[in-house]
Amino acid sequence: MAGVSVDVRRLGPCVLVMALMLPTTGCGGIYYAVNASGASSRLEEAKALGAEQLAPYEYYYAQAHLERAQFEASEASYSDAANFAETAEEYASKAIELAKSARKASGRD
C-alpha cells in the first residue's frame, strides 16, 4: 500500500460519529419490536381485566397508539413507531391500574 497515508488522529471523530449513528439506524426495528410487543401484551392484559368498560379512555388511547405504531413501522419510520408503542404501553398500564381499582371498589376482585 505504497503512497497511502492515513492520519489516525482524524479517524477518531469519524469512528465516534459512526458509533453514534448505529443505534439510530440499524437497531430501530428491533427497538420498535420490543416496545410494540410490550404494549400489545399490556393491552391484552387490560382487555382481560375489562378496561374497555372500566378505563375506556386509557384503553382506547393505548389501542390507537399501538395501531399508529404498527402503521409507522410499516412505513419504516421506526423511531416514530417506537415512540407510539411506548405511549401505547404507558396508557395500557394506566388502563390496567384503573381497571384493577374499579374491580376492587366494586367487589369483583
Image: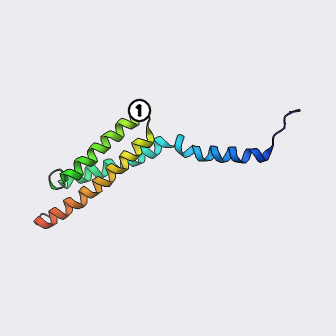
**Mark 1 lies on residue:** 75
Residue 5 in the image, given as x and y percentages of width and height: 84, 38
Left or right side of 36 for 7: right
What residue lies at 24% left-to-right and 56% top-to-bottom? 95
- The residue nearer to you, when weighing 49 against 10, is 10
Left or right side of 89 for 11: right
Residue 15 in the image, given as x and y percentages of width and height: 68, 45
Q: Is residue 77 above or below residue 92?
A: above
Q: Count every numbered label the image shows and give the total.
A: 1
What residue lies at 26% left-to-right and 53% top-to-bottom? 45
Amino acid type indicated by mark 1:
Glu
Residue 63 in the image, given as x and y percentages of width and height: 26, 45
Quadrant location of the C terminus in the rendered image: bottom left
The colour mode here is rainbow
Q: Is residue 40 visible?
A: yes
Q: Secondary structure at mark 1?
A: loop
Q: Residue furthest right?
A: 2
Mark 1 neighbour class, 10 Å CA radius: few under 14, some 14 to 19, many 20 or more: few
Quadrant location of the N terminus in the rendered image: top right
Residue 29 in the image, given as x and y percentages of width and height: 46, 41
Q: Is residue 38 visible?
A: no
What residue lies at 81% left-to-right and 40% top-to-bottom? 6
